[in-house]
Image: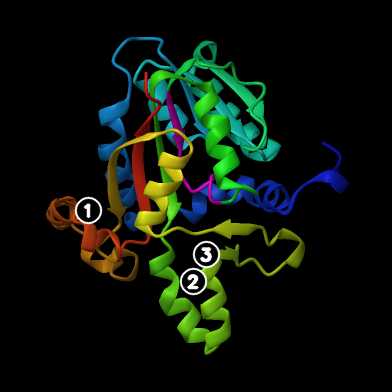
Amino acid sequence: MPRRQRQPVQRYHDRVASRYDASYDDVYWQWHDSLTWHHLKTYVPREHGAETVDLGCGTGKWGLRLLAAGCYVVFVDISMRMLEQAQAKVFAAGVEKRAKFVQADLMDLCELLPDRYELITALGEPIAASRDPRAALRQIRRTLAPGGVLVATFDNKLAALDFYLQQGDAEHLKRFLRDGRTHWLTKDASEQFPIHTHAPSDVRRLLESTGFELLDMIGKTVLPMRHYRDLLAEPADRRALAAIEKSLWRDPAAIGRATHIQVAARRPR
């Protein structure tokens, strides 16, 4: 795609692709990712070679786990530089025969076969970063096999209240609460792509209005461990805090204070 046509979300991720993993390489993100996988693995197809898609795959974190579980994986990202990082990892692991790489916007998934895939992941909020999350979900539903499952994350609108209060602008907060829209906080204005945030009830309505059946919803993370990384230093403490997190993450009240919302939703048969 010519540079002049690149969207802000693509420009940003192209620029950071080579150092993206280093930004998420500490004890907090290891703990966070173990929680993500604990929820996701329930929906990973059991049969070897099941066809899956990793939307907004980035450098391949979740697609590689699906490959390790025996799945066939289509890695999809709007950023070619991210796809190159993912592809290098897949080839290094020697599992390229069960992988395909597609550069695509979630608004147009025409390269994915309809009614085909048993599991689609959209982790790291790619749906929220699309121009129209409702239209993106319709694209995703079209490609899922009947009975297939989407596991996705959404930015929790309620978790952003403190940020807007810190700005001291009540009018801005009112606008945000009305439409849930903000933007990625990068310094380069040409890379500031829009982000749609959703309260838990919004996510449920969004999924149901696009033909999905909600199977599960969790808050992630309810415990604000990003601010208490030192408490994750010891393995025993990490396990204890993970157990506490899991005891809270389906409580409707607790989900409201989580940074993100992770869901599993099925295309009905």
Is 247 left, or right, of 254 in this rendering? left
**x then y, percent, for residue 179:** 55, 65
Judged from the image, the secondary structure of the residue bearing numbered disc 1 is loop
Is 181 left, or right, of 190 in this rendering? left
Judged from the image, the secondary structure of the residue bearing numbered disc 2 is helix
What's the magenta region?
Answer: 119-128
Tell me where residue 149 sits by quadrant: top left
Q: Which residue is mark 1?
A: 249
- Circle 2 Cα neighbour tier, 10 Å, few/some/many (<14 / 14–19 / ≥20): some
Please tell me whether residue 176 is drawn above or below residue 20 in the rendered image. Answer: below
Please tell me whether residue 211 is drawn above or below residue 131 in the rendered image. Answer: above
First in sequence: mark 1 vs mark 2: 2
Which residue is found at the position 65% from the left and 49% from the top?
131
**x then y, percent, for residue 205:** 41, 48
Residue 219 seen in the figure? yes
- The mark closer to the camera, 1 or 2, is 2
Instruction: Measure the alpha-carbon separation of dots 1 and 2.
Output: 23 Å
Q: Residue furthest front?
A: 209
First in sequence: mark 1 vs mark 3: 3
Closer to the camera, 173 or 22?
173
Instruction: Measure the alpha-carbon separation of dots 1 and 3.
Output: 22 Å
Image quarter where the C terminus lies is top left
Instruction: Measure the alpha-carbon separation of dots 2 and 3.
Output: 5 Å
Residue type (three-letter) at the residue carrying disc 2: Leu
Answer whether residue 256 is magenta in the image. Answer: no
Q: Contact (CB < 8 A) between labels 1 and 3?
A: no
- The mark closer to the camera, 1 or 3, is 3
The tag on residue 177 is 2
